[in-house]
Image (tube, rainbow, N blue to C red):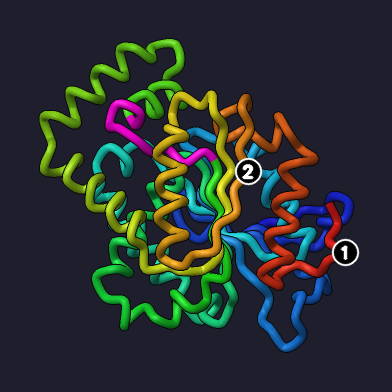
Amino acid sequence: MMSHSDGPLRSVTTHHLSKGIVFYANESAVKPALSGQAKPLLLMLPWLGSRPHAQAKYFEFYLRTGFDVLVVESDVGKFLWPPWGLELGAEVLKLLESDRFSNRPLVVHAFSIGGYTFAQLLVHVAKDTQRYQDLINRVQGQIYDSLVIGSLERMAIGVSQNLFPRFKFLVKHTSLLYFHMFKRQTVDYFNKSIDVFWNKPLTSPALYFYSGNDVLCDPEVIEKLLEDWRRQGISVTSKKWEESIHAGHLRAHPQEYLSVLVHFLCSINLVPLKAKM
C-alpha cells in the first residue's frame, strides 16, 4: 500500500488488490453529493495497453469530485481467451459485493475493449438477475468511451493497433485466424457477451463518447445500439466528434469531454453542481 502526496490528492491511498486490480481511496473529507449516501465508487475499465499516466487523468478527476476508484485492467490473454475474461468478471463481481464496497453507489466508466471486460461481468449478472438485483440497483450510471463494436475484424484491428502497432497487419490476420480456429472458445463467447451488452440487465442512465473517424468502432453500430437502448427505456446521452482519437477524446477535446461528463454525473446526483473541473 502506498500514499500519494501531490496537491489536492494528498490523501489518496493506493491498494493493489490483485493482479491488474487497484483501488484508489480518497481519504479526504469530500462529501457525497447527497447526504446520507455512501461515498460513490467508480469502476474504471481502461483500454488495452493503457499507461498509468494516461489513466491518471481520469481517476484523478473522479477522486477530486468525491469518488473512490477501482481500476480493473484488461489484458490481451483475457480478451483472446474469453473463459479467462469470464473468470475476471466473476472476481470483480465478488469484489463489488465484498464488505468494503457492498453499500456503495456505482458508476462504470469503460474504455475501448474495457467495455468487453464489463460485458463479461454482465454475462454472470444476466444468468441470475435475482441474485444480483442489489448490485444492478447500485449502478447509477454507465459511461462508455470508444467502445470497440462491430465485426470481429474490428476487434482484431483493435488488438493489433493497441498492442503491436509496428506489426499490426500481421497481428490482425493472426488474430482473425485464431478466432476462426477457436470459434467455440472465442467467437461464440464474444457473441454471447455482445448479446448481453445489447439487451443488458442494467437500465441506469448511459453516456457514450465516440467519433466518426474511429477505425475500431463502427459509429453506425453504436448509433443503432443507442437507439435500441432508448427503446428499452434507458436514458442515453451521447457525444460524437467527427474527428478524434480512439480512447483519447479527453486528450483531443478536454473541455468538451469534461463538461459533458460533469453534466452527466450531476444529472444522476453523484456530483454536486459546483464540481471542480
Residue 147 lies in the magenta stretch:
yes
Query: From what the image shows, is residue 234 above or below residue 222?
Result: below
Which residue occupies 31% across, 19% down?
A: 172
State the image coordinates of residue 36 (x, y, percent, origin top left).
Answer: 72, 88
Q: Taken as a whole, is the magenta stretch helix, strand or loop?
A: loop
Residue that carries the numbered disc 2 in the rendered image: 239
Please say if the residues under marks 1 and 2 sit with CB atoms less than 8 Å apart. Answer: no
Chain part drawn in magenta? 146-155
Residue 243 lies in the magenta stretch:
no
Residue 121: which quarter of the image? bottom left
Which residue occupies 40% across, 28% down?
A: 158
Which residue occupies 27% across, 37% down?
A: 80
Q: Amino acid at mark 2?
A: Lys
Query: From what the image shows, is residue 200 above or below residue 173?
Result: below
Q: Nearer the viewer, residue 225 or 157?
A: 225
State the image coordinates of residue 103 (x, y, percent, origin top left).
Answer: 56, 82
Query: From what the image shows, is residue 186 above or below residue 156?
Result: below
Residue that carries the numbered disc 1 in the rendered image: 274
**Mark 1: few, some, or many residues within 10 Å (few <14, many ≥20)?**
few
| In this rendering, position of residue 94 left or right of residue 56 | left
Q: Residue furthest bottom?
A: 36
Provide the secondary structure element on which disc 2 rests: strand
Query: From what the image shows, is residue 28 above or below residue 149?
Result: below
Residue 152: which quarter of the image? top left
Q: Nearer the viewer, residue 235 or 89?
A: 235
| In this rendering, position of residue 35 left or right of residue 81 | right
State the image coordinates of residue 199 (x, y, percent, origin top left).
Answer: 33, 60
Q: Amino acid at mark 1?
A: Lys
Provide the secondary structure element on which disc 1 rests: loop
Q: CA distance from mark 1 to mark 2?
A: 22 Å
